Image: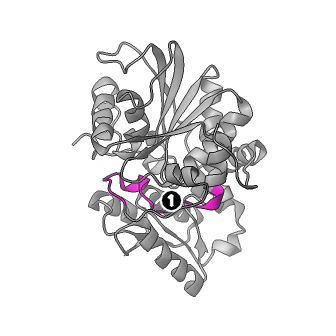
Amino acid sequence: MLTDSDSFDVTLQDIQAAALRIAGAVRRTPALALGCLKDPPPGDLSLWLKLELLQVTGSFKARGAINKLRSLPPETVARGIVTASSGNHGLAVAYAGHLAKVPATIFLPETVPAAKVAKLKRWGARIERVGQVWDDSNAAALVCAERDGLSYFHPFADPLVIAGQGTLALELLADVPELDTLLVAIGGGGLIAGVAAAAKALRPGLRVIGIEPEGAPTLRESVRQGRVIQLAEVRTLAGTLAPRQSAAINLALVQRYVDEIVLVSDDEMRAAARWMWFESGVSAELSGAAAMAALHSGRYQARPGERIAVIVCGAGSDGID
């Protein structure tokens, strides 16, 4: 396991409390057992897909945003909420604003696809376009929060958001308790931090494998150097997996609970998205196919008889177009 270097933590109790808090506002998504495949992935294995693309707003992000919202006093969010996002977290915060009946302002990089912007507007969000990457948009969102007295929802470096994302693992291990390995995509690290913390608490021997794009190895490089690093550039079309920098809490939890991080290419993500569409009718965005790409491409090599769950973390069609 990767070596721990910090005192940050999100506990199983935090994640169980989040599950109670978000009940009724998010969906319990299914774990789909894949069998009868025309072109199975390499290796002798059993495979499940945790279908978070069926979550409210199309990704796991609703879990963290609602846990954050319901942890704050109503008077704190009355003026409105704000975040920066490459799309999916923004949709989740827009949904949170819709539930709380308060304005939601979402700062987006210019690179976010028009379809996601349109979806944000349908949830009633106010949109601000700033910069080419999430980090640029986030700087502007923080200024806005301070200036206008808005509640800021960080997409990954917030214990409440991380705990909300971890509720996914509670569901998955209740449905498939015999799992050996979880494959989890990494953007800023909120999803894998919460999922790994829950999974290791419930099943210490379970392996958690993170997957990043080759063009944005933010956490893999941070783990290698033992500190939070900032990438000079990102080179991937998987925008929701492409912050230039993570945060100390995410790095600490990854170091403590994640066994390995592997990299995949954009082409491998696209091939995996097309494979899932052909084999199961699952329409994942490029980022949503990252975890499957590790298995489909052989970047992660399954052991004989291994029981593996892949988190399909976001819906979309850019992976299969």
Q: Nearer the viewer, residue 56 or 5?
A: 5
Tell me: residue 298, above or below residue 162. Answer: above
Give the residue at x 36% y 68%: 109
Residue sitting farthest toward the front: 225
Range shown magenta: 234-249
Q: Is residue 93 left or right of residue 73?
A: left
Quadrant of the frame with the N terminus: top right
Q: Position of residue 262 (x, y in %)?
A: 46, 39
Q: Element type at marker 1?
A: helix
Residue 106 is at least partly visible in this image: no
Residue pictured at 38% horizontal, 39% vertical = 289
Q: Position of residue 80 (x, y in %)?
A: 57, 75
| Crowd band around label 1 with a 10 angstrom C-alpha radius: few (<14), some (14–19), many (20+) | many
Q: Residue furthest left?
A: 321
In this rendering, the count of numbered labels is 1
Is residue 215 at least partly visible in the picture?
A: yes
Residue 126 locus on image (x, y percent): 42, 73
* Magenta stretch holds residue 17: no
Q: Main secondary structure of the magenta part?
A: loop
Q: Is residue 152 above or below residue 310?
A: below
